[in-house]
Image (cartoon, coloured by chain):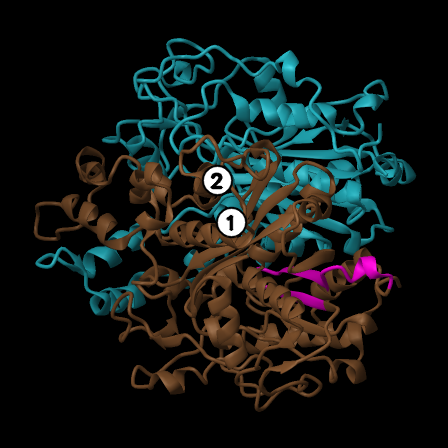
Chain colours: A cyan, B brown
């Protein structure tokens, strides 16, 4: 059964990141070892424990999307998603593909919620605050909400709005979905999009993620968790993955999108194949809400799933990427200052390798 | 299956109320909603459960960081585990002697969730500290960074992330398999059940917790649902009985829905392992489909009037189940009672089933009973369909006295019925559509199900 499943390839990519607003620029700057991290300008973070972040600067929505009037109320999230997806769509050549079956083209994003309307929230909540009773007076709050809360800014925060904007932009009506699993979301979205294609539910999927939490409440939340680096005097050296001197992560923002399609579909229309997806896994730590299981059982389980995925045997065929593995952590990483660095322990142990496969479904 | 709705805790209370035609809609108790455009809804009673008693003793401390949405999911998961007769880490209560029903690595969890609103009193008390000292008493970012934010508990953010529903459920029951949190408004629950089905089907898990949970019973969530143009304006002077007549799915007189809260989680198992352990099977998932529709021309919030994305989803589900439309015995549509959504759903159903067939297929609607529970809504509809197949019975259809043409079937009380396959389908806010076909347990194996 598994062997009859479709092979899935990447034919387009798009990036909106703090390093640049297209694949070529971002890639060149990554190779050059540039950093997109600097002092936060989006809001006044000068008194926050962390005063820096990786912001997207100089982004102009109208430079990326041909008719922005169709996306009048798009949040920053949705704008990043539209810009990145448009790049991917064009690179894949789907904008010039007259035979594309739009009912067989879907979307799976790992998009976060849109930034909250923080200024309206402070004004409204404070107007509704009953200082004597130390609580909100709902009648006063509702009256203030009527004056200050903007309908569209509230509606635009729903995490599935980016999917709707993409569907409108590209006119696609196939299977669509959005997941929100913190840092794992967009990789899970791409993995599940691949599974949808393999199952035969779609020929083409737009997949990826978009999010910005560089706003007054987002940074508050991560600062309260002591999850962010506080090296305010040296923002560009603050993010130190796997380094024993690390003191937390640096909050960034942006969108990354890929076009996935069956190998057959890509070949039939002569599309350039950038990579093939050959494995995907997902798991939960089921450990604690604040930190990861110290032996890395979660990441290990998802890597094992990705490695044994049917298609593994095709490693020799063309260019490949993988394994795609997901560590499902349920939240942003919280490498607190008090946490001792641990040795990476995710290598499969011989006792469980190879993992047992499902008798009725396995291709081997 | 496990549910927590305004009708009670546990699937039995939900089903009994559907059969008796009871509605949980009443005056909102969570806060004084009298100045809001909507002041009625379906709430889970404040004394319906005590979250500290629901979780294992060793996990009681964690209930402090559970918002309402998380609590509802945790309660429904406990109900579902009990109903399925599972032994998990959470039910074994620290005892190592009881063998677990499933290997934790083979248990997955997909729970649909919404955008969760932070507790307004906690947040505003912190805002209040960040006011300037001058006469404007306005909010100051400088003071917020210096002192105001420190008034929030350190784990504040973790109370409100949508994926914390699945996080707590997976920790309590030690589910280490594939896990996801789908955030597609009303479609979330059904899309999560669909994803769980695919996870089991492709062999990545033997069991999944699948469904959704959400509460709209706080000021900002209620206002957002109102701004999404989902809700009917209600006069604060209505009686509960009058409010219970407001939600009229597919009514020519539909004026909008009413807010709700709740959770519905199903335990999905691979048929072979469920049969092997000899558990009661409510229903089998025969097919699933999804699609997208939206019509930006009409304010950007509404589905396409032709129900295009939903048509595709239903056709995909039928093809996946390898059945034709004439083999569907009943339909559970989203049926919000919001005219533009009902119109789109009706158009899709007419296109797939044909007008003459559609007017004879019983429709099952749950929104008049439990309100519009956002991410939990479509999972509740799946629970209702599974109960119908299990009991071979159709529940009462409330507020169906003036249905749109072609959608008038079974506007009456509960009755026994021969039900082999039920379609659950609908479209939610922002255009994600789902369609799932459930079959009577064992029907596919009896030979009658072929074709």
Task: Tell me, yes or no, whether the highlighted magenta stretch contains residue B427.
Answer: yes
Q: Is mark 2 on a helix, strand or loop?
A: helix
Question: Residue at image x 66%, y 65%?
Answer: B425
Task: Give how far across and how far down residue B353 sits, in percent.
Answer: 79, 75
Q: Which of marks 1 and 2 is nearer the N terminus?
A: 1
Q: Which residue lies furthest to the right in this view?
A: A268
Position above or below: A201 against A312: below
Q: In which quarter of the image is the C terminus of chain B?
A: bottom right
Which numbered dot is residue B173? 2
Other-residue count near label 1 (Cα within 10 Å), few / some / many at <14 / 14–19 / ≥20: many
Which numbered dot is residue B81? 1
Position above or below: A288 against B225: above
Q: Distance between the residues labelled 1 and 2?
A: 9 Å
Question: Residue at image x 35%, y 83%?
Answer: B240
Q: Which chain carries label 1?
A: B
Which residues make up the magenta segment? B422-447
Task: Give how far across and how far down residue B386 sits, in percent.
Answer: 63, 64
**Mark 1–mark 2 contact, CB under 8 Å?**
yes
Q: Are marks 1 and 2 on the same chain?
A: yes
Relative to B121, is A42 on the left or the right?
right
């Amino acid at each position: 059964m598994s062997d009859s499943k479709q092979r899935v390839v990447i034919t387009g990519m798009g990036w909106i990141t703090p390093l640049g607003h297209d694949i070529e620029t971002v890639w060149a700057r990554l190779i050059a070892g540039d950093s997109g991290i600097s002092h936060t300008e989006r809001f006044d973070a000068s008194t926050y424990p962390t005063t820096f972040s990786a912001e997207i600067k100089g982004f102009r929505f109208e430079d990326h999307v041909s008719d922005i009037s169709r996306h009048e109320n798009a949040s920053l999230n949705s704008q990043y998603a539209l810009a990145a997806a448009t790049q991917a769509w064009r690179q894949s050549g789907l904008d010039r593909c007259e035979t594309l079956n739009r009912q067989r083209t879907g979307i799976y994003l790992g998009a976060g919620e849109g930034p909250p309307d923080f200024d309206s929230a402070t004004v409204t909540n404070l107007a509704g605050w009953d200082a004597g009773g130390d609580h909100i007076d709902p009648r006063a709050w509702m009256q203030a909400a009527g004056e200050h809360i903007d309908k569209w800014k509230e509606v635009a925060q729903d995490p599935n709005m980016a999917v709707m904007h993409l569907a409108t932009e590209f006119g696609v009506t196939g299977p669509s979905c959005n997941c929100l699993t913190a840092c794992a979301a967009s990789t899970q979205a791409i993995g599940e999009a691949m599974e949808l294609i393999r199952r035969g539910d779609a020929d083409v999927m737009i997949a990826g993620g978009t999010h910005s939490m560089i706003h007054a409440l987002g940074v508050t939340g991560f600062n309260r968790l002591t999850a962010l680096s506080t090296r305010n005097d040296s923002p560009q050296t603050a993010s130190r993955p796997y380094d024993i001197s690390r003191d937390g992560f640096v909050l960034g923002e942006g969108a990354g999108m890929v076009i996935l399609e069956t190998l057959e579909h890509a070949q039939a229309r002569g599309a350039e194949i950038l990579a093939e997806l050959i494995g995907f896994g997902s798991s939960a730590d089921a450990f604690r809400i604040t930190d990861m299981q110290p032996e890395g059982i979660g990441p290990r389980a998802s890597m094992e799933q990705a490695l044994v995925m049917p298609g593994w045997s095709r490693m020799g065929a063309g260019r490949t990427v993988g394994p795609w593995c997901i560590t499902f952590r349920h939240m942003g990483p919280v490498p607190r200052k008090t946490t001792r660095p641990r040795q990476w322990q995710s290598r499969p142990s011989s006792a469980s390798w190879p993992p047992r496969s499902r008798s009725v479904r396995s291709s081997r | 299956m496990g549910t927590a709705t305004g009708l009670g805790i546990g699937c039995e209370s939900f089903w009994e109320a559907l059969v008796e035609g009871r509605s949980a809609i009443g005056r909102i108790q969570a806060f004084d909603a009298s100045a809001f455009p909507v002041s009625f809804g379906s709430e889970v009673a404040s004394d319906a459960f005590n979250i500290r008693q629901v979780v294992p003793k060793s996990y009681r401390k964690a209930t402090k960081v559970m918002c309402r949405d998380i609590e509802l999911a945790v309660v429904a998961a406990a109900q579902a585990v009990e109903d399925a007769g599972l032994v998990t880490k959470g039910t074994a209560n620290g005892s190592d002697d009881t063998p677990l029903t499933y290997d934790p690595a083979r248990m997955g969890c997909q729970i649909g969730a919404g955008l969760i609103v932070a507790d307004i009193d906690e947040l505003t008390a912190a805002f209040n500290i960040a006011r300037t000292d001058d006469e404007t008493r306005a909010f100051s970012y400088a003071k917020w960074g210096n002192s105001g934010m420190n008034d929030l508990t350190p784990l504040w953010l973790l109370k409100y992330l949508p994926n914390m529903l699945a996080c707590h459920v997976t920790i309590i029951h030690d589910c280490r398999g594939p896990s996801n949190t789908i955030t597609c408004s009303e479609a979330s629950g059904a899309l999560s059940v669909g994803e769980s089905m695919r996870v089991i089907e492709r062999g990545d898990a033997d069991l999944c917790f699948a469904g959704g949970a959400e509460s709209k019973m706080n000021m900002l969530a209620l206002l957002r649902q109102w701004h999404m143009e989902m809700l009917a304006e209600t006069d604060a002077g209505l009686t509960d009985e009058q409010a219970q007549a407001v939600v009229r799915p597919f009514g020519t007189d539909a004026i909008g829905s009413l807010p709700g809260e709740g959770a519905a989680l199903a335990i999905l198992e691979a048929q072979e392992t469920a049969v092997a352990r000899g558990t009661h099977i409510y229903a089998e998932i025969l097919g699933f489909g999804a699609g997208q529709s939206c019509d930006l021309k009409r304010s950007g919030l509404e589905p396409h009037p032709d129900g295009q994305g939903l048509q595709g989803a239903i056709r995909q589900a039928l093809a996946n189940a390898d059945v034709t439309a004439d083999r569907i015995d009943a339909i559970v549509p989203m049926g919000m009672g919001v005219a533009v959504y009902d119109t789109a759903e009706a158009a899709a159903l007419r296109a797939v089933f044909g007008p003459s067939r559609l007017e004879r297929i019983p429709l099952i609607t749950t929104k008049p009973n439990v309100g519009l529970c956002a991410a939990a809504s479509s999972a509740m509809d799946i629970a209702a369909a599974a109960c119908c197949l299990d009991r071979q019975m159709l529940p009462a259809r409330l507020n169906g006295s003036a249905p749109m043409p072609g959608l008038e079937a079974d506007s009456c009380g509960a009755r026994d019925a021969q039900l082999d396959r039920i379609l659950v389908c609908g479209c939610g806010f922002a255009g994600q559509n789902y369609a799932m076909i459930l079959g009577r347990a064992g029907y596919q194996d009896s030979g009658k199900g072929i074709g």
